[in-house]
Amino acid sequence: MAIWIRGGRVVDPLKGTVEEQDVVVDRGRIQRLAPWGGFNEDGPRVKKIEARGRLVVPGLVDMHVHLREPGHEYKETVATGARAGAAGGFTALACMPNTDPVNDNRSVTEFILGQARAANLVRVYPVAAVTQGQKGEALTEFGDLEAAGAVGLSDDGLPVVNSEVMRRALEYAQYYGLTVISHCEDRSLSAEGAMHEGTVSSQIGLPGIPAASEEIMVFREIALSRLTNCPVHIAHVSTEGSVALIRRAKEDGLAVTAETAPHYFTLDHTAVNGYRTDAKMNPPLRRPEDVEAVKQGLEQGVIDVIATDHAPHSPLEKDVEFEQAAFGIIGLETALPLTLALVEQGILSLAGAISKLSLNPARIINVEGGRLEQGGPAHLTVIDPKAEYTLGPEDIKSKSKNSPFLNVPLKGWAELTMVGGRIVWDRHPSHTRS
Amino acid sequence: MSTFQHKDLLSMEQLSVKDINLVLDTAESLKEISLREIKKVPTLRGKSVIHFFYEPSTRTRTSFEMAAKRLSADTMSLSASGSSIVKGETLIDTARNLQAMNPDLIVIRHSATGAPHLLAREVAASVINAGDGINEHPTQALLDLYTIRERKGRIKGLDVAIIGDIAHSRVARSNIIGLLKMGARVTISGPPTMIPCEAESLGVQVIHDPVQAVRGKDVVMMLRIQLERQSRVLFPGVREYAAFFGLNQARMKHAKKDVIIMHPGPINRGVEIASDVADGPYSVILDQVANGVAIRMALLYLLIGGSRRGDMD
C-alpha cells in the first residue's frame, strides 16, 4: 500500500529549500515528490497522512551514539536504542565500539548488525575500534571490519594517545573509505577531573577538566590530517579554542569535519550546581563563552554535524557521588527540539539545521540518506514544529533516563519516522490519519 | 532568640552572616562546659549521632565525638573499612540503612565532593559535612572564625592570608567563603600549581610570594602540605617548598605585630611551618583545636537540640 504524505513543508538540505510538497511512498521508495495539490489519488490503496503545517525532512542520522550492546544490556540494547532513536526522529544511528567485548573485530560488528536487523526499526551502522581492545597499540582489521559493515573507526572515550598509531590509522582507514572519528582528550590533563575547570569548579570544589585537554588533541588531529592528507572527524566539540582550530583547518582546505552535541549549545557549566550527575559528561559542559562559540561554529559551518553522544547509564552509575558518577547523558529523544531551538534563535536556517542532523553526517560516514529524492529510499521524518511537550522519565523510550532535559518544556518533535517506507514511529497513530 | 533554620550543615555557602554569628555566640556560651569538673550536660540526652568517616581523621572525629558526649548524645562511629562500603554498598543504600535506625544526626566525611549533599537528600536526620573531597569543611571554618573573633574581637575589616595548596584544600575554600561573608579581606598564596583556576572569581587577592602575601596581615593561616600530592607534580619536593613557601620567623616579621598564626592540622613541622613559629607566642593552633569542640557542640545543639522539626505540628 502506498503512503501519501500530504502537503507538508519538505526540507531539502542540499538545495536549502523548504517547499510544500506531496510525498508518495511505495515499495520502500519515494515514488513521487511534487508540489502540493498535483497528486490526488484517493482510494483504498493509499494511506493518507495529513502533513499540512508539518515539516517533512530526510530521516535524521545520528553519527555518535552508545547502544551498550553487547555487554551493558541493563543500560541499553540495540533494540531499545533503536526505539529511542525512532521516537526522536532518527532513521540511522552510528554506534560507538566501547561495548564489552569491544567492537574491534568482525564478529562483534556482525552481532550488532544482527541485533539491529532483529529490532527492525532504524538503520544501525557500527563504528569499530581503531585499535585492538581500544588499547591504543595495534590497529584493528579495518578491511575486514569494513567488509562486515563498519562505517567508521574510533577509540572514542579512550582516545589513541600514540601519534604514530593515529597517523597510520588515518592513512590505512582512507584506503577503505572509513572515517576516523576522534574523541579529543589528553587524559593526562583531564586526569580525575569531573567537570569543566573554571569559575564553577573553583566555587563548588570539584576537580576540573581544562579546555586545553580537548584542544591539544584537536590540534594534533588537524596536524595529522595535514601530514597525511587524510580526513579526520572531530567528535563532540565543546570549546571556543577547538572551534577556532577547526575553523583554521577548514580555511586551509583540510579534510577536517566536526560535530557537537545539543547539550554543548544548550547548557553551560553552571548546570552542574547542586552536583547534578545528569549534567556530568565528557567533554564537560563549558563556559557561556564556549556555548556561544559552539553556536557560532554551527552557524558558520565550522561544525558540520549535530550528534547526540547518546550515553545511557543506569542509576547504578548516576545516583552516586558526583566524582564517582559515569560521564554521559542520553540524547536521542531530545536532540531534535534542542536543535530546532537554534532555528528559532536565528542561528541556523531550517535547512541548515536539518543538514546538520541528516545530510552532513550521512556524507561523513558515507551512508545513504540525507536527501529526499524521487526514486530514492524513503527514510524520512515528519516533524510538528509547534508541538510542545515536557518529557518525564516515563516517556523516555531509552532504557536509561539520565538526561538534564527531562521535565523541561521543549518545542518541535518528531511525529512520524519512516525507514525504508515503513513507519517505525508514530506519535499519534489514531487521530491524524484518514 | 533567633533560630537556626537549617536541617543540615553542608557548606559555608548556605550560611548567612546571622547564622554564622549565631553559631559563634552559641559556641561561646557552651565553651565553659569543657572547663568544668564534670564536663557533661544533659542537653542531647536520648539523641543519637552517627559519625561516618569515609576518610581517616583524628582531630575532627575526636572533636565531634567529644562534643556529642559532652552534650550527652549517644554516639557511634563508622569508618569505610569497617562498614558495608567495602562490600560495595552504595552511599544511597548506606544512607537508607542508617536512616532506618532513625538517628538524629549524621556527621560525614567523604573523599568525594558533594557526598554529604547526596546523603542529606536521602535521610531525614540532620547531616553535618565534616569534609567532602576538595570542596568544603564548614565546621573547620566556623572554629577558625571563632578563634579569630576570640583573639581579635572582630572579623570585619581584618586582613587574612591563607598560604598553601589552596586548590586542593576544603579548609581554604570554606574559610574563604566564611571570611568574606564576615567582612574580612582574604589573600591566598602558594606556588601557581596550588592556586585554584580563576581564583579571583572567589573574591580573593592572589599573591604568590609568601613575604608579600604576609605583609601587613592580621591573620596568617597555613595549610598542611599533602605530601602524597608530590607525585602529582604540584611541587618538586619538601625541601624546596620549605625554603620558598614555608612560614618561618623571618617571613612572619612582615605581618602585623599582633598577627596570629593558624593551622588546621596536622602540621608538618619544618615544611609549611617552622617549629618555632608553630610553638611560638603568635600561634593559636591549639586554641583552634579547643574551640573546635565548642563549635561542634553549638552545631549539634542548634541542629538537633530542643524539639525536632515536625514534632510541633
Image (tube, coloured by chain):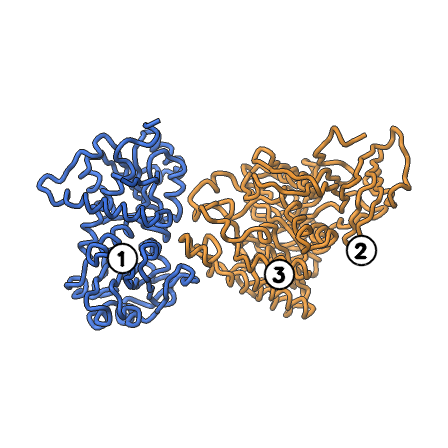
Chain colours: A orange, B blue
Q: Which type of secondary structure does the marked residue at label 1 adopt?
A: loop
| Nearer to us: label 3 or label 2 | 2
Q: Is residue A433 above or below residue B237?
A: above
Q: Do the residues labelled 3 and 2 touch (CB within 8 Å)?
A: no
Give how far across and how far down residue B278 sits, in percent. 18, 62
Calculate the distance from the C-alpha at mark 1 to the C-alpha at mark 2. 68 Å
B216 sits to left or right of A263? left
Give how far across and how far down residue A7 sits, in percent. 83, 41
- Amino acid type for the residue under numbered disc 3: Ala
Give the residue number, with chain letter if any, for mark 2. Answer: A15
A15 sits to left or right of A212? right
Whether residue A291 can be seen here: yes
Mark toward the start of the polypeptide (3 vs 2):
2
Give the residue number, with chain letter if any, for mark 3. Answer: A169
Give how far across and how far down residue B123 sits, in percent. 37, 35
Identify the subunit bearing mark 1: B
Residue plotted at (54% across, 60% down): A214
Residue plotted at (75% across, 36% down): A423
Q: In this view, does A191 lie above or below A389?
A: below
Q: Categorize mark 2 by other alpha carbons within 10 Å: few (<14), some (14-19), many (20+).
A: few
Q: Which is nearer the eye, A420 or A338?
A: A338
Q: In this view, does A239 lie above or below A406?
A: below
Give the residue number, with chain letter if any, for mark 1. Answer: B155
Identify the subunit bearing mark 2: A
